[in-house]
Image: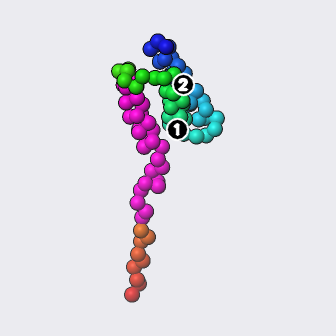
């Protein structure tokens, strides 16, 4: 398979992953990883290809960003301690 055709297939898989994630309500990152594993085995991708290494590195950075952006900030903040009442004495 030519590099251009392979890039087109990978782009189609990314779009497919986003549509699947919206339908089933699962994280797009998990579906992209699963589809990437399936595509890698199905198309026998050469992991030493320079452009594929670049895409994999870039995707890992994006997935790390998405994992951090998906966190609930309220859960990450430390809980406030209740205020102590001053005695009227």
Whole-percent x and y of residue 23? 64, 35
Quick one: label 1, few (<14), some, or many (20+) residues within 10 Å?
few
Q: What main secondary structure does the magenta stretch of the protein show?
A: helix
Q: Is residue 67 magenta?
A: yes
Whole-percent x and y of residue 68? 42, 43
Mark toward the start of the polypeptide (2 vs 1): 1
Residue annotated with mark 1? 30
Q: Looking at the image, which is closer to me, 37 or 55?
A: 37
| Whether residue 75 is visible | yes
Instruction: Give the residue at x 49% y 14%.
Output: 1
Give the farthest residue toward the bottom: 89
Q: Which of marks 2 and 1 is in front?
A: 2
Q: Looking at the image, which is closer to me, 72 or 86?
A: 72
Instruction: Indicate which disc residue 42 carries.
Output: 2
Q: Give the range drawn in magenta.
A: 52-80
Q: Looking at the image, which is closer to me, 51 or 67?
A: 51
Instruction: Give the residue at x 46% y 54%.
Output: 74
Instruction: Give the residue at x 41% y 75%.
Output: 84
Q: Is residue 22 magenta?
A: no
Quick one: label 2, few (<14), some, or many (20+) residues within 10 Å?
few
Q: Disc 2 and disc 1: Cα gap in Å? A: 18 Å
Instruction: Indicate which disc residue 78 carries.
Output: none
Q: Quadrant of residue 79?
A: bottom left
């Amino acid at each position: 398979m030519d590099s251009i055709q392979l890039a087109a297939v990978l782009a189609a898989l990314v779009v497919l992953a986003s549509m699947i994630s919206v339908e089933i309500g699962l994280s797009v990152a998990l579906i992209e990883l699963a589809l990437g594993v399936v595509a890698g085995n199905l198309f026998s991708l050469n992991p030493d290809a320079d452009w594929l290494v670049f895409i994999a590195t870039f995707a890992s950075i994006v997935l790390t960003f998405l994992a951090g952006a998906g966190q609930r900030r309220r859960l990450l903040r430390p809980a406030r301690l209740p205020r102590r009442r001053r005695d009227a004495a």
